[in-house]
Amino acid sequence: MPKARDTQVFRPPIATVTLFAAAVLAGFLLVDALVRAGVVEMLLLAPWVLIPLWVVYLLSYTSHIRVDAAGATVQNLLRIVRIPWAAVAEIDLGWQIGFTLHDGTVIRSFGGPSRSRPGRTRRADNGEPRVTAGERQLERMREQWRAAGAEQRTEAGGVRRSWDVPALLVGLALAVWAVAAVLIAGV
């Protein structure tokens, strides 16, 4: 079992900022509805504020890459793919991180490191080519992969695909709440 300190999560920094800003806005709107209209009306309005917040969460925050000593977990929106290091043939950085498996399948991540736009200065102060944040994060992933051992990488298989059940349940609960709000309000 991988240790918690060996686990690294890669997601774009703007994802956290976006989710926080959306949550603050949603909180403000719900408090405003509570103060102006009361508890019952606020509860009838709440799903229409929380559904967009859930969508922002899905689009900005859920997509990420988690790597540990056993492998990588790629989450793209509601889809989760667990890739053991034994199944990985290469990790590359195109416009996004891609895990190439021994069978030729490429699993790309919507979240995590991505290729940076070239800046005006392409060289560091010492004259060496500048290393971008995405390239540094790619190298940290490759270090975890190499640490798993070359003999382990000759084995294939073990890739598991699943859904983000908690996020799906929250979406379902919000949909049911929205339908109930419409029925109660009599619209």
Image: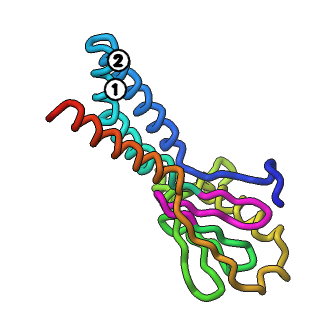
Category of crowding for the residue at label 1, using alpha-carbon neighbours closer than 10 angstroms: few (below 14), some (14–19), many (at least 20): some
Q: CA distance from mark 1 to mark 2?
A: 6 Å
Is residue 77 located in the magenta-colored stretch of the structure?
Answer: yes
Q: Secondary structure at mark 1?
A: helix
Magenta segment, which residues? 65-80
| Residue 102 counted in the magenta span | no
Q: Residue furthest bottom?
A: 103
User: Disc 1 residue type?
Assistant: Leu
Rendered location of residue 29, percent (x, y): 33, 23
Q: Secondary structure at mark 2?
A: helix
| Spot occupied by residue 165 in the image (x, y as percentages of width and height) | 53, 56
Quadrant position of the N terminus in the picture: bottom right
Residue occupying the point 64% across, 76% down = 159
| Color scheme of the displayed model | rainbow
Which residue is tagged 2? 39
The numbered dot on residue 43 is 1
Q: Which mark is residue 179?
A: none
- Front position in the image: 170 or 146: 170
The 10 Å Cα crowd at callout 2, few under 14, some 14 to 19, many 20 or more, is some
Q: Left or right of 25: which side holds 129?
A: right
- Left or right, 12 with reference to 48: right
Q: Quadrant of residue 43?
A: top left
11 versus 50 height, above or below = below
The amino acid at mark 2 is: Val
Q: Residue furthest top?
A: 35
C-beta proximity under 8 Å, tags 1 and 2: yes
The location of residue 69, given as percent across then percent down, is 79, 63
Q: How many marks?
A: 2
Q: Quadrant of residue 105?
A: bottom right
Q: Is residue 129 visible?
A: no
